[in-house]
Structure formats: structure tokens, C-alpha cells
Amino acid sequence: TAGEVSSAAWAARAVVLAAADSLDVAARQIDNEVAALDAAIDVARAQVAVADLVLPATTRIFNAGGASAVRDELNLHRHWRNAQTVVAHNPLDYKRWAVANWEVNNIQPPRTSYF
């Protein structure tokens, strides 16, 4: 379990850093619509991928640790709660749809508060 959780955390970090690189490129090219679109798609991809990595990993911590994993002294439940909160505040189904619509139909995501 520790190996799985560590690997998921490592992969999630790599995904977030890749999305951050896209955002850096877009920030340096402020008037470049293509760079902005690429960054928006990469961030949506990252949100989906990280949720798919982190939610199962935090659940595995509880499954492996049993009742002792939820002791207040360890405060491990904060990781699960934080992951759930982030996922709840980011509409993953919308992100999946937007990425798929871009990949399959070459249709840009709408410019909304979600992007």
C-alpha cells in the first residue's frame, strides 16, 4: 500500500508540474490564444488525472490502516478530506467532456468560470 500511495503521489506531482509548465508558457505569451487553450486543456487533464490518482490512494491508506488510520493524532483523514474537497469544487465530468470534445471534435472548451 505504501508503494502504491507513494507512486500515486509521485505521478500526481508530475502531472501538476506539467500543467504548471503549460501555464508558465501561456503566461509568457500573454496574447497567444493557442498557448492559453493548451494550458486550459492541460489543466483540465491534470485535474481529472490527479483526482483519479489521489482519491483511490487516500482510500487505500484507510483500508490498509484500519481504524488506527483515522486516529486524530495521525490526522491522516485530512488528506482524504482535502482530496474530496478539491474534487467536489472542480466539475470533473465537465473537464472530461471538455477534453474529449477537444480531442475528438477539435472544439474548444467554452470560456466559463470553469476554465
Image (cartoon, rainbow, N blue to C red):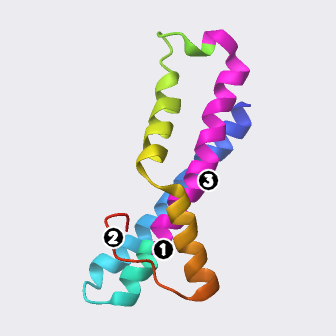
Number of numbered callouts drawn:
3
Q: Is residue 54 magenta?
A: yes
**31 above or below 76?**
below
Q: Look at mark 3 in the image and give the residue it sits on.
A: 11
CA separation, marks 3 and 1? 18 Å
- Seen from the viewer's position, the closer of residues 89 and 32 is 89
Q: Which residues are magenta?
A: 41-68
State which quadrant residue 23 falls in.
Answer: bottom left
Looking at the rendered structure, the secondary structure element under dot 2 is loop
Q: Say whether residue 109 is left or right of residue 99.
A: left
CA separation, marks 3 and 2? 28 Å
**19 above or below 2?**
below
Q: Look at mark 2 in the image and give the residue it sits on.
A: 112
Q: Which mark is residue 41?
A: 1
Q: Which quadrant: the C terminus?
A: bottom left
Give the mark toward the camera: 2 or 1. Answer: 2
Residue at 50%, 63% (x, y): give it. 94
| Residue at the outermost left position | 30
What main secondary structure does the magenta stretch of the protein show? Answer: helix
Looking at the rendered structure, the secondary structure element under dot 1 is helix
Residue at 37%, 78% (x, y): give it. 25
Q: Which quadrant: the N terminus?
A: top right
Residue at 31%, 65% (x, y): give it. 113
Q: Are marks 2 and 1 in contact (CB under 8 Å)?
A: no
